[in-house]
Image (cartoon, grey):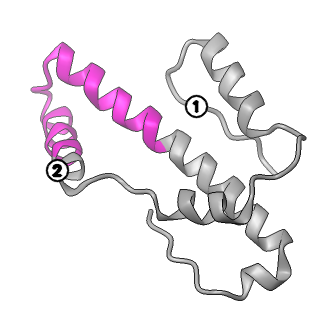
Amino acid sequence: MAKLTLPQLPRSEADILERLIDSKADDISVPVARHILAMHFAEEDVDRMNDLSAKARDGTLAPEEDDLLNSYLRIGHFLSMMKSKARTTLKRCSPCSSTSIRSYP
């Protein structure tokens, strides 16, 4: 499996988060895995990300907006990695994996 990395984080922060996520310690519990899979950005945040992305494509993004967009991207990537770990946990728990799990992108 390819190693996931957090984009545009200072290397020290990215290393810490990768060690946290890729920890060989016990998997997260099934209830926690299900909770992580249910996590998603609020509609207002999705709208803000779309607005910021459009401004970035148009080249009209202010520096503080660029910082905010990068924060959204990093948090979204981190959430994706946590959801991957949650899905792995549920896959290892065969009786649990057959139950309905609602996942958000």
Determine the CA span between mark 2 and mark 1. Answer: 24 Å
Image height of 61 relative to 91, above or below: above
For marks 2 and 1, the one nearer the N-term is 1
Q: What stretch is highlighted in magenta?
A: 48-76
Q: Name the residue under label 1.
A: 6
Q: Is residue 60 left or right of residue 80?
A: left
Residue 94 position, x and y percent, is: 84, 81
Viewer-closest of 48 and 40: 40
Circle 2 crowding by C-alpha within 10 Å: few under 14, some 14–19, many from 20 = few
The answer to which quarter of the image holds residue 65 is top left
The residue closer to the viewer here, 1 or 105, is: 105
> How many numbered marks appear?
2
Q: Is residue 79 left or right of 55 when viewed as pictured?
A: right
Give the residue type that dot 2 points to. Glu
User: How far across and down, in percent of the image, does residue 33 sit?
Assistant: 65, 60
Location of mark 2 (residue): 44
Which of the 4 image quadrants contains residue 6? top right
Residue at left 13%, top 35%? 55
| Residue 24, above or below 66 | below
The chief SS type of the magenta part is helix
For label 1, the SS is loop
Residue 61 shown in magenta: yes
Label 1, residues with CA under 10 Å away: few <14, some 14-19, many ≥20: some
User: Which residue occupies 35% across, 36% down?
Assistant: 72
From the image, state whether disc 2 or disc 1 is nearer to you. 2
> To which quarter of the image does residue 35 belong?
bottom right
Q: Please, is residue 103 above or below residue 57 in the view?
A: below
Q: In which quarter of the image is the C terminus?
A: bottom left
Element marked by disc 2: helix
Pointer 2 with pointer 1, Cβ within 8 A: no
Residue at screen point 48% across, 64% down: 38
Q: Does the magenta stretch include residue 11?
A: no
